[in-house]
Image (tube, coloured by chain):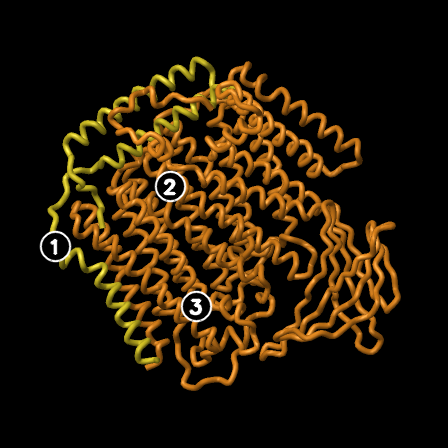
Amino acid sequence: MTPFLVLAGLWLLLGAVWLAAYPLIAGGREPRESTAGLSELEAEKDRLVQELHELELDRTTGKLSDEDYRALDARLKRRAVATLEDIDAARAERPSRDEPGRL
Amino acid sequence: MSVYRLGELALWVGLGLALYGAFVGHVGGKRRDPRLIESALRSVFGTAICVAFAYLLLTLGFLNDEFRLAYVADNASRAMPPWYKATAVWGGMEGSMLLWALILAGYSTAAVWIHRRRQPDLAPHAAAVLQTIMAFFLGVMVFSSRPFVMLDFTPPDGLGLNPLLQNRWMAAHPPSLYLGYVGWSVPFAFAMAALVRGRLGADWIVAMRKWALVPFLFLTIGNLMGSHWAYIELGWGGFWGWDPVENSAIMPWFVGAAFVHSIMIQEKRGMLKMWNIGLVTAVFSLTILGTFVTRSGIIESVHAFASTDIGFIFLGFLAVVIGSSIALSWWRSDLLKSENRLESYASRESAFLFNNLLLVGIGFAIWWGTFFPFISEAVTGERISVGPPFFNQVNGPLSIALLLLVGIGPMIAWRKASRRNLQRNFRIPLAVLAVAGVAAVALGLRQWYAVSVVAFGAFVVATVVQELWRGTRARMRSKGVGPGPALLGLIGRNRRRYGGYIVHLGVVLVFAGVAGALFVTERAVRMRPGDQVDVGPFTVLYQGTDVEGGPNYTATVANLTIRDGDGEPRRMRPERRFYPTAQEQVTTEVAIWSRPFEDLYAVLESYQPGSDAVDVTLLVNPMVLWIWIGGGVMVLGMLIALSTPRPGTRRRRATAVPAGRHGSEAIAGGP
């Protein structure tokens, strides 16, 4: 039993090293250019939507004056629309599934 | 070859992979080289495999009574039940380090897996930082504190686990606390990655919200468990003794609480960027310091069961952590400037800032009191200790101010509170505060702390109830539903916000329980069979002792019958246990009758075999139960906040409309 366990353990450790080494051995892709991916823009859009929702709740529960609400709401909506435009542009540029960090 | 020798090999391979990942993560991230990045990210998984394998082997060593392993021989014995053998893995320093590494491996794997696509710019650098932390702990285990050292002979039995640690709460307490400690590695790693990449907007803060809440949750659970263990196991009648190791666990909780609140300000208003980097560095450093205090033995404590020379290794690592954070923050100081200024002291931002100052102030006071003996000895050669009075005197007023802010913070307006806002939001809670304060004094409370807890606690409860009512009413109007569905919908749709309010309710209950400690009644008596004694509302009758055997101990048990007025009598059986291992240790097992407004707490201090007389200490501890209930409510609130879906996922699931077709109409919606 022990020799089998030792052998299995050694293979496991070898597998752990192989896991890290594989991308180097397999070679493949060229260096990336982009710094901000589509996923980050999507996350930004989702965050802005959530923030707008919370803004509404803050106004309803009396923690924002109407004046502040209108100013913040307009600002957030402008940012949301700009982000949506960026997402459309990014999708047009990158139709493939070349997502960063794919393992 | 013994299979256990593979444990040491696994640690070496893991160390190699961690060092490799630390280097390649930064280089790959800087060059934007996908192969290097993928290799670095995968090195995290490879290291996790090595660490998990080593941990499994050590656990098998304990379960199989493999006493050739020096660590197993030092911390286990054949008579121990299997459950305690499995938990004895972290009963000493070497195993604790391995548990640290195992938990870090789990967190690192999850963080890298989740964020490799969401934050592709930050992930390789964060992985590099996580691997650096891992390399430190694996290095400690490979070079200094080795769990797989083999003896030249096989001892017939081991020394056994410290009996104080043979308690179910103590079995669960260290893993929970370590989940809390180690979890802060992830926000710290992403903060450093954000500094390296110069991406210091709200992105990293938003990404780390839940990664901060998870360790905060586990620190809460860990501290509650530790406190409960101290209460039921140490036999001195209290739940918090300001022991250095207790303090080391609570310090990151306070500073972590500051971070959990201050990131909201950066998220909403683009302020406190430098402060947040400082806070996350401080929390992470305090977790390392906490481990150092427990393991170095520099400060005497019931917890500091290990005394080795690795203390300075920890201090060196701590210096690297703090130094790196300061250097990177200096380098990126232009990007860490606030986007907005504090416009009024009567504002949400200001309330959060004061809340932060109080939380950090409490954390610093505890740090100072804990390390003062160490500092005084280093400076003057004389060890001067400060005890519970110091901590109580300093933290009492600070905590009361904090309780008041718990009520003010969520109610006050952003940017600048108008007179109308103040009147609308604070009129009712302030009236409740006044009524509760007057009622407390009228009912006979005289201690300022207790009166403040009643008044300010009522204020907080009123603010939360008012907030829930207003949100519910708004939802009833907008959705046309009844109060029940509206309330559930309100909480379900805004889990982070209302989860936070539920945590605040739990805080009030914990305060109530802590204030009860001001009213403890204590009697220490020698009793012979048939003797009767009154303590508080209880009458205690002693009826002799029994001797009973446990799996690895012998216990002397005192039989007490308790009466409270005309109610049914109740039996309580405090014990003294003798563990016949090489250490020959005696422990007390207290008996507790826990009721909503007081606990009767009985300790068998000693017994006289000839006369069957016993020395018993009896305490009536008011309100203790509310500490555990309040802690449970806090945990519930945190779980609700944590269950918040990632922004957009619920909507995507419901509509499955491509993002480009969402207009600003998609952002409408009621509370």
**Where is mark 2, residue-wise?**
B208
Shade of chain B as shown in the rendered figure: orange
Judge if badges 2 and 3 mark residues of a common chain. yes
**Where is mark 3, residue-wise?**
B94
The answer to whether marks 2 and 3 mark residues whose Cβ atoms lie closer than 8 Å is no
Left or right, B13 with reference to B388? left
Q: Nearer the viewer, mark 1 or mark 3?
A: 1
Amino acid at circle 3: Glu
Of all chains in the rendering, the one displayed in yellow is: A
B33 or B297: nearer the viewer: B33
Q: Position of residue B167 (x, y in %)?
A: 59, 64
Instruction: Tell me which residue sits at (38%, 31%) in the image.
Output: B267
**Where is mark 1, residue-wise?**
A27
Q: Secondary structure at mark 3?
A: helix
Instruction: Tell me which residue sits at (66%, 59%) in the image.
Output: B232
Q: Earlier in the sequence, mark 2 or mark 3?
A: 3
Q: Secondary structure at mark 2?
A: helix
Q: Position of residue B191 (x, y in %)?
A: 34, 43
Give the Cα distance between marks 1 and 3.
Answer: 39 Å
> Looking at the image, is B285 positioned above or below residue B171?
above
Instruction: Tell me which residue sits at (49%, 54%) in the image.
Output: B177
Judge if badges 1 and 2 mark residues of a common chain. no
Q: Nearer the viewer, mark 2 or mark 3?
A: 2
Residue B394 showing in the rendered view: no
Left or right, B125 with reference to B599? left
Judge if badges 1 and 3 mark residues of a common chain. no
